[in-house]
Image (tube, helix red, strand yellow):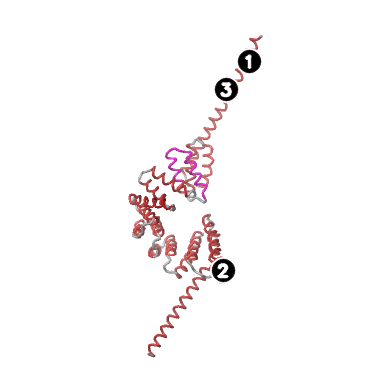
Amino acid sequence: MTENRQTMNEWNRKISKETKQKHGRRALVAALLFGTALMMSGCGQQRTENAQAYRKIGINAMAEGDYEEAIKNFQLALDQSRGQIRNLELDICMQKAEALYLNGQPEEAAAVCDAVLDYDKSYANAYYLRGNLYLQQGDEKKALADYEQAAKYADADYEIYIQLYENLNRAGKRSEGEVYLTKALELKGKGRYHLTNRGYIYFLMGDYGKAKEQLLQAVAIEQKEGADDKAELYLAQTAEKLGDGETAEKYYQAYARNHADDSIVLEELGNMALEKKDYVEACAYYQKGLQTMNPVNEQLLRRGEIAALEQLYNFEEAKTKMAQYVLDYPEDEEAAREYLFLKTRTAVADQIAEEEQAAQAQAAEEAAQSAEEAAQEEESAQQ
């Protein structure tokens, strides 16, 4: 009995020591993630609202490319936590890590991912982002190891599987990336979310028939429920691959009605209108795309707008816009050649305009002279 009690006491001491170590490790992680937030005061609800407000400011700063401002506001958001770690704080940590990377601070970004994983070894987004950092640095072995962990803990997060594929595909490792698309197709579910993502995965794999089948079901549910996701966009892209331009345009327009800020879709609609020789509509779509906040495809939108203006014989405006374009994108040699062509066209147009003005002036002068001669003849006849 005494021996059993001693054994139990040793076990309790061991458990107590491990618990203290675990709590100590979590406290260290909290300090790494949240800095000096532990002494802050205020009610929990107010702190949460403050955190969400700072997070939103950080996201907006990221969209505008002001990464230092984003980092500052993400840290202010974390400072509201008083060391409490919830899904909100973990998400903000990932956003801060991304901003650090984009600001040219990959080591600091990786440190944030490390700290999050010390706290929660099943946090898929941290593996995913750290894997991206390794891939960018050329450490393929570590990147693939982290990607494997990201997929392991992704659950039903299709976006992680799709991003893993797209990153590896861009790195010239399409076959490795397709492994994750295949894993994603093994996820079970019949709702709109699953149908949409499975359809897009089939699209990425080049199986446009299955993509169309899944996406048509997703769109039908979307229209019935009044929900909003990317099923219409993916269906438009699939129809385009199948050579069905009319259906593609139909779904692009349907998607654009609820996504007026999607510059990629507006560019696609502009391209379609240009192909149909509806240059006024094409120009309007390109200009709408340029009016969105920080369009990622600004260069393509500007080229499309110039092309539409040329087709509308608005050479002067096209030349003005092309002059600025070649300054902003000097690597576009074709545009530089086209600029010379536009200058020639506008010079010819100016010459034609001058000739027309001269002809109009001469015609007016001749008409005035004829009128004067007619008046003189009439006066002579009366005398």
Above or below: residue 44 compared with residue 191? below
State the residue position of label 2. 43
**Amino acid on which the number 3 mark rests in the picture:** Ala
Residue sitting at 44 percent across and 78 percent down?
18
Q: Which residues are magenta?
A: 267-292
The nearer-to-camera label among 1 and 3 is 1
Q: Is residue 214 above or below residue 374?
A: below
Q: Secondary structure at mark 2?
A: loop
Task: Give the Cα distance between marks 1 and 3.
Answer: 18 Å
* Viewer-proximal residue among 288 and 149: 288
Residue located farthest toward the front when viewing the structure as drawn: 224
Q: Residue at x 39, y 44 (%)?
A: 247
Using the image, determine if residue 217 lies above or below residue 118: above
Q: Residues within 10 Å of mark 1 (few under 14, many from 20)?
A: few
x then y, percent, for residue 183 = 34, 60
Residue in view at x 56 percent, y 29 percent: 354
The residue closer to the viewer here, 250 or 201, is: 250
Q: CA distance from mark 2 to mark 1?
A: 97 Å
First in sequence: mark 2 vs mark 3: 2
Residue type marked 1: Ala
Query: Magenta stretch containing residue 273, yes or no?
Result: yes
**Residue 86: horizontal and vertical position, in percent?**
48, 67
Q: Label 1 belongs to which residue?
A: 375
- Circle 3 residues within 10 Å: few <14, some 14–19, many ≥20: few
Q: Name the residue tied to disc 3.
A: 363
Name the magenta segment's main secondary structure.
helix
